[in-house]
Image (spheres, rainbow, N blue to C red):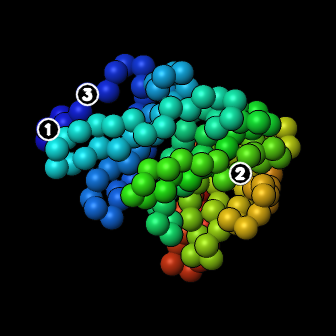
């Protein structure tokens, strides 16, 4: 065990993903120049930490969540802000590190996770689908403009306040916790 980078107490590092070259990419829930989150790269050979994207709230969202690798790029979500104040789905191209917003959350707002299904679509949990405080599940295909709510939790009947990641099992089913 060795500490290879010391984050500041205000950064709240969250998630890591590995690039094809072995370097680490990740998100800080806070920190960055606006203190609403950042994406970073950590070069494991040189131990160099580089901020790639400082989130700014209004255009690109704030408080990034997890990131996943798909088709030559990293994808992730922010849980707040963006043009509709519901968060964003973003793309960080590899190896150029070019950042772009792919979609803005409106109905499936405040996303908390993102996972990739074998069908090529993204799935995740959101805190307030259509304003419902019980939470829900969204689906997003890259050829769509906005994520779609596919399930809304009903409190005690079938779950409440989903958090964490969703995983696909070998039978193709997707599992998560609420």
Which residue lies at the image location 54% right of the left edge and 47% below the top edge? Answer: 99
Within 10 Å of the Cα at label 2, are there few (<14), some (14-19), or many (20+) other Cα atoms?
many
Residue 98: assigned label: none
Residue at screen point 83% across, 46% down: 107
Picture quadrant of residue 168: bottom right
Residues 173 and 5: in front is: 5
Tell me the residue that label 2 is attached to.
Answer: 103
Residue beneath label 1, please?
Answer: 2
- Label 1 – label 3 distance at C-alpha: 11 Å
Q: Position of residue 98 (x, y in %)?
A: 50, 50
Say if mark 1 contacts mark 2, CB within 8 Å: no
Between disc 1 and disc 2, whose residue precedes? Answer: 1
Residue 124 image offset from top left, x and y in percent: 64, 54
Element under disc 2? strand
Q: Position of residue 62 (x, y in %)?
A: 61, 32
User: In the displayed structure, would residue 28 be above or below residue 72?
Assistant: above
Of the residues under marks 3 and 2, which one precedes in the sequence? 3
Residue 150 percent coordinates (x, y): 79, 60
**Label 3 vs label 2: CA separation?**
32 Å
Q: Farthest residue in the bottom direction?
A: 171
Q: Nearer the viewer, mark 1 or mark 3?
A: 3
The residue at which mark 3 appears reads as 6
Nearest the viewer among 26 and 130 is: 26
Q: Nearer the viewer, mark 1 or mark 2?
A: 2
Quarter placement of the N terminus: top left
């Amino acid at each position: 065990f060795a500490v290879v980078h010391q984050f500041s107490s205000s950064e709240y590092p969250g998630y890591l993903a590995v690039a094809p070259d072995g370097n680490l990419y990740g998100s800080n829930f806070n920190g960055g120049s606006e203190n609403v989150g950042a994406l970073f790269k950590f070069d494991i050979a040189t131990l160099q930490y580089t901020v790639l994207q400082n989130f700014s709230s209004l255009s690109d969202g704030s408080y990034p969540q997890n990131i996943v690798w798909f088709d030559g790029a990293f994808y992730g979500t922010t849980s707040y802000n963006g043009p509709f104040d519901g968060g964003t789905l973003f793309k960080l191209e590899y190896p150029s590190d070019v950042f772009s917003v792919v979609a803005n959350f409106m109905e499936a707002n405040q996303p908390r996770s993102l996972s990739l299904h074998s069908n090529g679509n993204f799935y995740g949990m959101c805190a307030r689908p259509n304003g419902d405080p019980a939470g829900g599940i969204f689906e997003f295909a890259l050829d769509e403009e906005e994520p779609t709510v596919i399930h809304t939790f009903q409190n005690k009947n079938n779950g409440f306040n989903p958090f964490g990641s969703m995983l696909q099992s070998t039978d193709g089913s997707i599992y998560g916790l609420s």
